[in-house]
Image: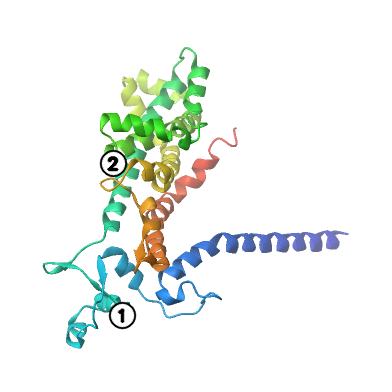
Amino acid sequence: MAAVRSSGQKMVNRVVVALVILATLAFLSPIYWIGSTAFKPRNQATTVPPTVFFEPEATSFVKLFTKRVQLSRPVDPAVYAASPWWERRVFDAGERVLRTGDGPQLSAYSNRFFNSLVIAISSTFIAVAMGTLTAYGFSRFKLAAEPDLLFFILSTRMLPPVAVAIPMFLMYRAVGLVDTHVGLIILYTAFNLSFSVWIMKGFIDEIPKEYEEAALVDGYTRLQAFVRIVLPEAATGIAATAVFCFITAWNEYAFALMMTNRNAQTAPPFIPAQLGSGITDWTVIAAGTVLFMLPVAIFTFTLRGHLLRGVTFGAIRK
């Protein structure tokens, strides 16, 4: 009987492992597809059936970061030979790079990518900082109508963002915040703040009050106790909250499309608009998407140790 149970358990384990592998492949297949498309020649990006084996090239990344025009006539062989390798890739695609002085003209993607970094990092920092302070107040002090206040904060996440798009646009236009970095930072901070408050309150509730009381007895002020006792203990929660806030701000599309035009536009609404020779250039879109995924992947991978503990913190109580 024991042998039969052991055999059955092994079979169950094998089935579970197989299901996990299949699920992993299913989730990774879109990433592989967009990554492979970024390195395909343009004429192989939309073939039917799809091209699986190909010689990778970096032409799409060169196009992504440079301004180009169609060649009006075949390029001079001497000019072709004297050009850098990345410019020869564009020549092979029937285009040439526009130049300003001695250097190439950069495309608008560079500015959009930089805008995404500035806006996402700034809004994440402000949302986590304000959320941590607010959560500490709710956790350590008795406030009048505390449940109602917490519910009001949470209710801001219940309304679909698109429902307030037009009122927000009219308000921003009235105060001159349309197409500004400050406008998007304020907007993303407001939407992330409720999430930050609720998540951080759960973490701070798990930190024993006795630690702070002992610090106060030793002569610490409330602020010193918060900085030296609570913040180090809540570092895991801060890291986990920062990851989720950063992902939300980094990937936001609707408000970035409606509230910005050129100066503060982020990468998400700009990437799908990439055109080449009058038609959609899927290789350039794929290249922009691959580069756009890297900061989130690096940030999440860097904080992976805190993230796993952070999302399970408080699940088991002694």
Question: Compared to 147, does 276 lie above or below?
Answer: below
Return the residue nearer the eye: 7 or 113: 113
Q: Residue furthest bottom?
A: 77
Return the residue nearer the eye: 318 or 99: 99
Residue 261 placement (x, y as % from top left): 30, 46
Question: Compared to 67, does 171 lie above or below?
Answer: above
CA distance for labels 2 and 1: 37 Å
Q: Residue at x 45, y 45 (%)?
A: 306
Q: Is residue 294 visible?
A: no
Colour approach in the figure: rainbow
Question: Compared to 137, does 246 lie above or below?
Answer: below
Q: Is residue 313 visible?
A: yes
Q: Which residue is mark 2?
A: 179
In the picture, measured across the screen, residue 43 lies left or right of residue 22, that is left
Q: Quadrant of the C terminus?
A: top right
Residue 147 placement (x, y as % from top left): 52, 19
What's the mark number on residue 272? none
Query: Tag 2's secondary structure?
Result: loop
Residue type, mark 2 in image: Asp
Please report contact status of discs 2 and 1: CB closer than 8 Å, yes or no.
no
Residue type, mark 1 in image: Asp
Which of the marked residues, 2 or 1, is nearer the chain's N terminus? 1
Q: Callout 2: 10 Å neighbours few (<14), some, many (20+)? A: many
Q: Which residue is mark 1?
A: 92
Q: Callout 1: 10 Å neighbours few (<14), some, many (20+)? A: few
Q: Residue at x 33, y 49 (%)?
A: 266
Residue 231 placement (x, y as % from top left): 38, 33
Q: Residue furthest left?
A: 101
Return the residue nearer the eye: 302 or 188: 188
Residue 103 placement (x, y as % from top left): 15, 67
Q: Quadrant of the N terminus?
A: bottom right
